[in-house]
Structure formats: C-alpha cells, structure tokens
Amino acid sequence: MTIKAGIIGTGFIGPAHVEAIRRLGFVEVAAVAERGDDLAQAKAKQLSIPKAYGDYKKLLADPDIQVVHNCTPNHLHFGINKEILAAKKHIISEKPLAMTSVESRELVRLAKDAGVVNAINFNYRYMPLVQHAHQMCTAARDVGRIYAIHGSYLQDWLLLENDWNWRLVPELSGASRAVADVGSHWCDLVQFITGLKIVRVMADLVTIHPKRKRPKVEVETYAGKVLRPEDLEDVAINTEDYGSILLEFDSGAHGSLTVNQCAAGRKNRLYVEIDGSKCALAWDQERPNELWIGRRDGPNQLLLKDPSLLHPAAREYAHYPGGHNEGYPVGPKNLFRNVYGFIEGTRPGGDFSTFQDGHNEIAICDAVLKSSRERKWVDVDY
Ligand SMILES: NC(=O)c1ccc[n+]([C@@H]2O[C@H](COP(=O)([O-])OP(=O)(O)OC[C@H]3O[C@@H](n4cnc5c(N)ncnc54)[C@H](O)[C@@H]3O)[C@@H](O)[C@H]2O)c1
C-alpha cells in the first residue's frame, strides 16, 4: 500500500523533498502545510498536492498522514518536531535538528520514547561516490590508516552587504550560522565517510560583514533579489560568515575545515580530502560524479561514477549508468528510499542519518562556538 507523506514548509528545500519522494514511486505526497491558507493552497496547486493546510497542526491531526517532513526554518524545528513525535507520526526533519544541544538531546529521547522512525536530511551521505568512499575507508580498508581529513564548505550567496536571508537572524537561525548551516554537513559527511568521530575542536569565527542591509519585505532562500536602496535598513550582524576550525578525531587523526559564505564564485562547494597510509581521496560536491584517488606508488586515478565500478554496497546509490551524471537530487532520494523502505519493512534500517546524528552536529557546533569565544581547544560534549 502507498505510504502517505505530509510536508511542512515549501520554500527552497520543501519542494526538493517533494521531488525526491515522488522519484521513489511507492510514497504519495498527500498534504502540505504552510503559513496561512492562501500560501498553502497556492503551493499545493503549484506542486500538485491534494490537501493544503494553512496550519501545520491540522496536517498533524490528519489520520491519513503517516510520515511528516519538517522543512521549516531552524527556529521552528524543535517545537514542530516535538509535536510530530507527540502525534506518533514518522518524522524526517531538516537540519539543524533544533537550536541548542539541550533541545536536540531532548528530541533524541522523545523520538526513542515515541517509537517512530526518525531521520534527518544529511543528504550528501547518500551520493554514489560518497558511499563508495565510505566503503573504501571502512569495510574495504583501501585507504589504510587515516592521518588527516581536511576541506572546506564555500558559498558566495551572502558575499555582499545587502544579501539577506532569515539565516542572518540568530533568533531564527541559531547562535552559529556558517558552521551550523553548512559546516554541519561537512562534519557529518567526513565522519560518515571515515567512520571516525570529531572529539575536539579549535575554532576561529569571523563576521565579515558586522552590518548588513535588510530588506523591509521578506525574501525566500535563493529567490534572486532586485531591491531599491529605500527598501533596505541597516542591521547589526553577530553570527559568523567565515570560520576556520582545527579538528581532532577519536582515532587520533587530525583535520581542518574552512567555511565561508562570502567566497566569490563558490556556489555550494563542499570539498573533502582524506589522507590515508595507502591512498588519499578527494570529493567535491560541485563535481559529484568524480572521486579522486591519490597514490604515491602509482598513477593517481579519477573514478567516474559508474555503478559497475562501485563497491557492491555502494551500487544501489547510483540510478543511471556511467556517463549519465547524477547530482544533488539523488542524495535526498536515496535517503528517503532507505527511510521509507524501513517504514514499509523492505529494508533493514541502520542506513540513514537519525536524530542522534542531528544532535551530534549541534554538539560539535556548541564546541566550535565555545572554542572561538574562549580562544582555546574544546572537547565536544555529546
Ligand atoms: N539538507 C540540506 O541540504 C538543506 C538545504 C537547504 C535548507 N535546509 C534546511 O531546510 C530548512 C528550510 O530552509 P529553506 O532554505 O527551504 O528556507 P525557506 O525560507 O526557503 O523556506 C522555509 C519555508 O517554511 C515556511 N514556513 C515558515 N513558518 C512556517 C510555519 N509555521 N508553518 C508552515 N510553514 C512555515 C515558509 O513560508 C517557507 O516556505 C532550514 O532549516 C535549512 O537549514 C537544508
């Protein structure tokens, strides 16, 4: 029988969830909730979703809905996630899981008590060559002992002083911005690929634009904005545009991460490099169909995504033959396949990111903020 899903929030990422769910074939997007009836109905029509609710509480009260996707801004995650769990619906939350680690720890506990399936959208884990890299670092032991893990997450959409989004307001986004918003993806990804855990951090966070110009009207994420000077007002900014972070992993491996939301020309460049005793690996989210394998004792390789060349356990994450490129949308599709397959009883579970992973990322963020404030190394308090 078809599983019925409901989506709360349809800005940038909500429609990406809708598309990914529909590519599964055995799940129906049955309802959407937005802020007010007019917006809900407009979005339902645009996305061809049968039911529209102007209040998410009505979606939670709908007995047809079995799984709820929380795609609202950060400050609503904790409260809405709690209500989804109280309604005993399975839940897929957007990251960050909550605004603080006190809240995220509580959600981990509540999810366990509710006995529902819980997941968080750390989508980059589910790209075919990331899965292959994970197998190379773990089961296959191709990489050997991991010495160092380094990379960056660079974007340019907040480069200018008059770029604006709710993520610039700590009450809506959280005490950390660049690290929580994109650095969290990087930290989750390297821990997933290597199987190692970040245990200590030393961070230097910088607000490149201490003052920005906020539009007096609201702007949807990535909507593209043409505003006149009289539409703008000055606002003080106190979350980081940039961060450099030294990392220590539980194996003793070391690493570093640079995040920057003011890096001209870099759109969504999540880049990871892993130096092992047998070989090195490098992967760039903007070129997701290529995995670089670096060798000391032979020519370096560039593995192009091709299911027949992937580790057997990574093969099901590729849906098209070699040379037929797959990109960003394949991540959520594979995650949702794993989650919904578990709900339906056709997959064993254990192959998707959960609220525990969401909590872990917030714990790392807390340590990063503390380290930057106190100018010293800080242990991650999971
Ligand atoms: N996993 C990823 O790669 C990824 C990518 C982008 C965004 N996100 C996360 O997704 C969340 C949303 O980000 P976005 O970029 O889509 O933001 P957005 O501002 O484009 O969209 C947010 C949507 O939520 C709606 N909303 C606000 N309050 C609501 C309420 N009370 N009830 C119902 N709907 C409500 C808004 O009207 C809007 O449509 C954020 O937490 C962000 O961190 C994750």
Image (spheres, rainbow, N blue to C red):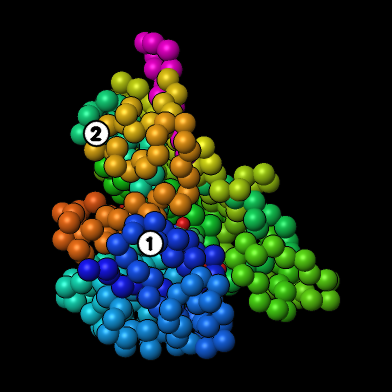
Query: Disc count in the image?
Result: 2
Q: Which residue is mark 2?
A: 312
Give residue 70's mark: none
Q: Residue 148's image quarter?
A: top left
- Please give the name of the residue rendered at 72% of the width and 65% of the height, measured from the top-left corner: 225
What secondary structure is the stretch in magenta mostly built from?
loop
Q: Is label 1 in contact with label 2 (beta carbons under 8 Å)?
A: no
- Please give the name of the residue rendered at 48% of the width and 87% of the height, measured from the top-left corner: 54
Q: Is residue 241 above or below residue 149?
A: below
Report the quarter where the C terminus lies.
bottom left
- Please give the name of the residue rendered at 18% of the width and 54% of the height, measured from the top-left corner: 347
Please, what is the three-letter code of the amino acid marked with disc 1? Ile
Q: Is residue 334 above or below residue 210?
A: above
Side (left or right) of 4 relative to 349: right
Q: Which residue is mark 1?
A: 21
Q: Would residue 193 be visible to someone looking at this image? A: no
Cα separation between marks 1 and 2: 24 Å
Q: Nearer the viewer, mark 1 or mark 2?
A: 1
The front one of 137 and 345 is: 345
In percent of width and height, residue 160 lies at 72, 57
Please, what is the three-letter code of the amino acid marked with disc 2? Pro
